[in-house]
Image (tube, grey):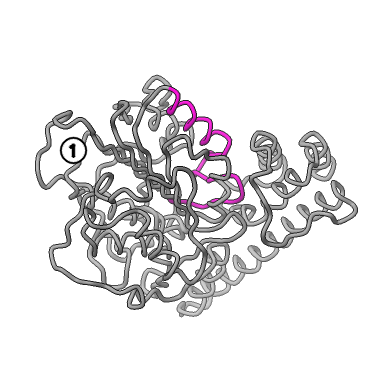
Amino acid sequence: MEQGDEETLVSILYSSCEREISLPKREFPTSPWVMLVAGSNGWDNYRHQIAHQNGIPDDQIVVMMYDDIAYNNNNPYPGKIINKPNGPDVYAGVPKDYIGEDVTAENFLAALKGDQSAVKKSGPKKVIASEGNDTIFVYLSDHGSTGLFSFPKSTLYAYDLIDTIVLMTTKKHFSKMVIYMESCHSGSMFTDLSGDFHVYAVTAARADENSYACYEDTVRKTYLADEFSARWMDFIETNDSKNKTFRDQFSYLQETMKGSHSCRFGDMAIGDCPISVMLNNTPKTAHKKTNAEGLNLTHLTPSHEVPFKILELRIKTESDEVKIQDLMGKYEALHQTRAKIERTVQGIRQHCCPGAVVEDGRGENFSRMDLHAFKSVAEHFRTTCFDWHKEEFQITLAYMDVFARLCVHGVKAERIIEVITSISG
């Protein structure tokens, strides 16, 4: 995903949760909570950033967004964000509970489990203060790779996410939780999610594939949205959530997505619940949309290719020869960086597994991966070789599946770390 696109989606989602009626807290046995997270930063990630009219009180919605898109120097329409061609502004009125440096994996986990003492930020520390009968809906959008979801300056690993879910389940923090995740390889984040936890997760992509961006904008020179989020949000906006289930929505995603393949995990019984259990929407205008009709999503592009496509677009539309040369230099540098990362990763793989047992094919069973071991390996590689939190090395995420495959095939974390240290030196 590109940084900014998710901020757009968070705004839209917040618009879907804004109260049209005032609901006193705890008036009903079940109280809905919503957490919306746009992890990226930067104009090139426009499509990732941006949810308010579902009858959920403001104090039960937590929003995390880097918030550097609306007034970015590259934005030709300061203060406005759209998520589809000629679409309405979706930025106005969106709250900012966590912005900038406060948008971290650590704060996300602390807020999700309601632990204010673990939140690291100045000012109010808004958290999900749910109880045993409550429901929680979580939406996350950012870059990702096998076994990890990347925040601007920190990483959310599958190991820590599942550990937090287990803790929340044990302490009875909710009755049902639904998690939607938009990122490359997002299917790998929930392979250890037990169906006993009353958590239902839906992802933008399988464990072994990219998610896709869409709507290339020649004026803003970036992508406006992502296929998965655009489709499931459209389903929410055009269907009566009381009459549609999460299973209905997932079927729609399976039938209409052309780039990646949406996956689901966890408690499948939640799939039979009406969407209104989490998000309540009644379309103002009745419109029976067929699956075949769907959305006309243009410019579907694998997320890891987006930085190259954006530079190509900027070169193509730039008239200043000096700026063109500068952009071409950045384009070539990005290719060289990708080649260097690929050589390094493949060198590590060959040293760890000389017999070429680990191939980069699809269909790997990542449920066999030791999540803690992978986290140790990935963090060592990030801090030793290429830190994907730095813009120039963000493309590193495209190659982390190699380390996940090594872990799946039984190569010890200690061995992989030893090789990484040797090659980096």
| 105 lies left or right of 72 | right
Q: As rendered, which of 245 and 346 lies closer to the eye? A: 245
Q: Residue at x 41, y 26 (%)?
A: 119
Q: Quadrant of the C terminus?
A: top right
Q: Residue at x 47, y 53 (%)?
A: 203
Q: Is residue 51 visible?
A: no
Q: Is residue 187 visible?
A: yes
| 235 lies left or right of 325 | left
Q: Residue at x 51, y 71 (%)?
A: 323
Question: Considering the numbered disc 1 on the image, is that residue within a helix, a strand or a loop?
Answer: loop
Residue 166 position, x and y percent, is 49, 29
Q: Is residue 341 magenta?
A: no
Q: Residue at x 33, y 29 (%)?
A: 127
In the displayed structure, 166 sits above or below 301; it is: above
Question: On the image, numbered disc 1 is attached to which residue?
Answer: 57
In the displayed structure, 70 sits above or below 425; it is: below
Disc 1 packing (10 Å; few <14; some 14–19; many ≥20)? many
Residue 70 position, x and y percent, is 31, 55
Q: Quadrant of residue 28?
A: top left
> As drawn, which residue projects farthest toward the left?
21
Q: Is residue 168 magenta?
A: yes
Q: What span is in magenta?
A: 141-170
> As drawn, which residue projects farthest toward the right?
355
- Residue type (three-letter) at the residue carrying disc 1: Pro
In the displayed structure, 263 sits above or below 424; it is: below
How many numbered discs, if any? 1
